[in-house]
Structure formats: structure tokens, C-alpha cells
Image (cartoon, rainbow, N blue to C red):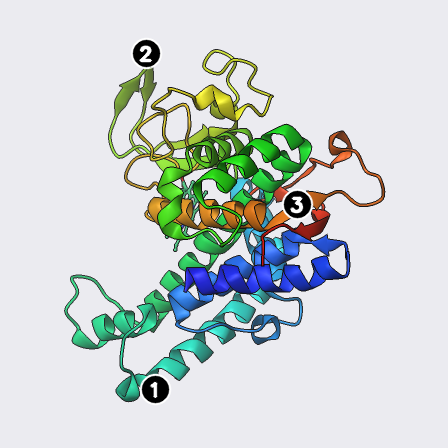
Amino acid sequence: MRRQQVELMIESLKNEARDRLVVDLSAKVATLSTDLTCLMVFGKKYMDEDLDKRGFKAVLQEAVHLSVTPNLGDFFPFLGVIDLQGLTRRLKDLSKVFDDFLEKIIDEHVQSYDQKQSKDFVDILLDIMQSGDTEFQFDRIRIKALLFDMLIAATDTSSTSIDWILTELLRHPHVMKKLQKELEQVVGLERMVKESDLENLKYLDMVVKEGMRLHSVVPISQREAREDCVVDGFHIRKGSRIMINNYAVQRDPNVWSEPEKFLPERFVGSSIDVRGHDFQLLPFSAGRRSCPAVELGIIIVRLAVAQLMHCFDWELPSDMEPCDLNLDEHFGLVTSREKHLMVIPTYRLNE
Ligand code: HEM
């Protein structure tokens, strides 16, 4: 399924490359990510308008934006009633959009339940609900919450990670060339990249790590202290809310040399990894509430970046120089590019 969807993206880019068109690469990657998530979680793809006329990307971005916007009502409860910033109203509108969409998905699954050959994620959740075999109440509302969580957690994180790595490759043509060289040696120009190639692409691994270090897609993690404890001499009271600034950690000059620079080579001979054991690199966070899909997330990011770099050469439009690329970030739970990445592809495989 992952192979098919990535190949579909490559196919559409190939057509645009033929006509030398400027393509919105951020939009292509966002569509890939939404399609992969819908297939994994709901068992089929949905069109943008199935969710809302604004489309998946815009609605999901609104959700991740609102979820971290400070609400005065949280600090001064009497202001909560007035909803000065209009956040409660916007969240209620958004909640209705998602609720209608998820209700439709559950209904579709209930109707086709008996004819299914293989079960998807929603079918399995329905099984659990019907079995009544849980230690806690597990009803339709819980299923919707889980599906919503998966949709939010999987879609924007993957596409934003890919988007930033591609941005850095475009800003550093010599790194892009070096990566393409590795792809030529390991895969060859006669075929596309397969997932089984990924473990042999050592430089790709460094490029992905460095992109994720420099652009902390989830810049802040939140935790709650379950018991009184002391960390580095600080007493942390049970129930305290802890905000971990992943962005600052990953650019900490005490840990990283030249932290603002994109230098994949810094990982040569290093065992630092993204899986939450090395606290200086936390793209998937760490501990019990870290990302449960690290392996999947890493495969999606590596495969998409490798395939795009292997199949195409990339140019910036309108004589733009690599250093002119806009790096502004969009505020939200997930920090994406403010402006979309616009590029001209040239197909480079021998076919
Ligand atoms: C490159 C892609 C991804 C990145 C960078 C990423 C990053 C993260 C991070 C940092 C967290 C923890 C947030 C915190 O500390 O509070 C998280 C949680 C989570 N992620 Fe991912 N993620 C990615 C892909 C995915 C995918 C593909 C899925 C699902 C298919 C997924 C499902 C989840 C879920 C369900 C949680 C919440 C876990 C909980 O609440 O305990 N993620 N992710």
C-alpha cells in the first residue's frame, strides 16, 4: 500500500516534469500522507470534500493550531464564558466537522461488516466495542476519539517532516547530490527505490535525522508528574504539568556543534538515534507517551524522501537561489512550513 501510494505521487510528478511545470511539492506530500493515513486507519481513501470543503490539510492544520492556542478562559475561568478569542466557537465548529466525518466512517463499517474478507483498524475497534470485553467503558465516542487521534497524529507529522527535509536538501544542493549518488550506487538508475533498500541507505538515514533535528516537527511535549520527584536538583510536585522544549534541546549548543547548520555528516560514526533513547534527539519524543508509530513514521519519511530524490532532479523556480528559500514556520502543535515548497522536477531514471 505504501509502495503504491508513493508510486502514484511519482507518476503525477512525472507528468508535470514532462511539461516543465512548477509543482506544489508540499501539497503533493500532504496528499500522500492523508491518503496513507486514511488507508491505514479507515481502510480506504477519502476525497478532500468528504471531510469539508476546505480539504484535509486545512482542517487538520486548524485543529493542530487551535489545540495549542492559549485560551484566556483556561487562566481566568470567568472569561471562558464570554469566549473573548472566539476559540470555543471555532473548536465547536471543527468538532462538528470531524464528528460528521467519523460518524459516516463508522456507519459505513457497520453496514459492510459481514461482507469483509479482512478487517481494518475501525472493524477491530468495533469488535472490541461489541465484545464488551474491556475494563473501561468503550463506546462509539471512544472509537471516534481514537480515530481522530490517529488522523491528527499520523497525517501532519509525517508530511511536515518530509517537507522540511526536502527544504533542507534544496537549500544544500551538495547534500542532495551526495544523497542521489548513494541512491545511484545502492538502487541504480534502472528502477525505483524499494523499502528493502532503505536499510542500505546510510547517508539517507543521516539526512533524515539531521532534518528532524533541525526542524522539530512537534516542538513541545507535555507530561504530567505522576509522583513527587527530583530532577537535576529541582523538586517537581506530583500533578505538575511539564513542558519539554524539544526544539531547544535539538539546537542546544552545549550538545550540538554548529546547531543551526544542516550537517548530516555530524552523524558519521555516531550511535545517536531517533527512538527516544538519546535525549538530545527527540523527534518522536521519549518515554511512555512517545510516538507509538516511530518505526512506521521513519519508514514513510525515508521512503518518500528517497523516492523523490531518486526519481527527480529539482530546481527552484524564477531563478530563485537556494538561500532565498523561505523558512518561516506556521504556529501549531505541529510546526509546518508557512509557505508551500514550489519546485520544478526533472525525471532522472532510465526508462
Ligand atoms: C514522522 C512522523 C511522525 C512524527 C515526527 C511523530 C511524532 C510524535 C510525537 C513527538 C509524539 C508525542 C507527543 C508528545 O510528546 O506529547 C507522537 C505521539 C503519537 N503519534 Fe506520532 N509521529 C509520527 C508519525 C505517526 C504515525 C504515522 C502515527 C499513526 C499511524 C502516529 C501516531 C501517534 C499517536 C497515536 C500518538 C499519541 C500517543 C499518546 O497519546 O500516548 N504518529 N508522535
Q: Does residue 278 appear in this view?
A: yes
Q: Residues within 10 Å of mark 3 (few under 14, many from 20)?
A: some
Identify residue for label 1. 112
Q: Which of labels 3 and 1 is toward the front?
A: 3
Three-letter code for the amino acid on which mark 2 is drawn? Gly
Residue drawn at x 47%, y 36% is 204
Residue drawn at x 66%, y 67% is 54
Helix or strand or loop: what does disc 3 sit on? strand
Three-letter code for the amino acid on which mark 1 is drawn? Ser
Which of the pair 323/91 is nearer the observer? 323
| Label 3 vs 2, first from the N-terminus | 2
Determine which quarter of the picture holds residue 81.
bottom right
Name the disc covering residue 313, or none.
Answer: 3
| Label 3 vs 1, first from the N-terminus | 1
C-alpha separation, residue under disc 3 versus residue under disc 1: 44 Å
Three-letter code for the amino acid on which mark 3 is drawn? Asp
Identify residue for label 2. 233
C-alpha separation, residue under disc 3 versus residue under disc 2: 52 Å
Q: In the rendering, at what x and y percent does residue 304 appear? A: 51, 50
Helix or strand or loop: what does disc 1 sit on? helix
Q: Is residue 338 above or below residue 154?
A: above
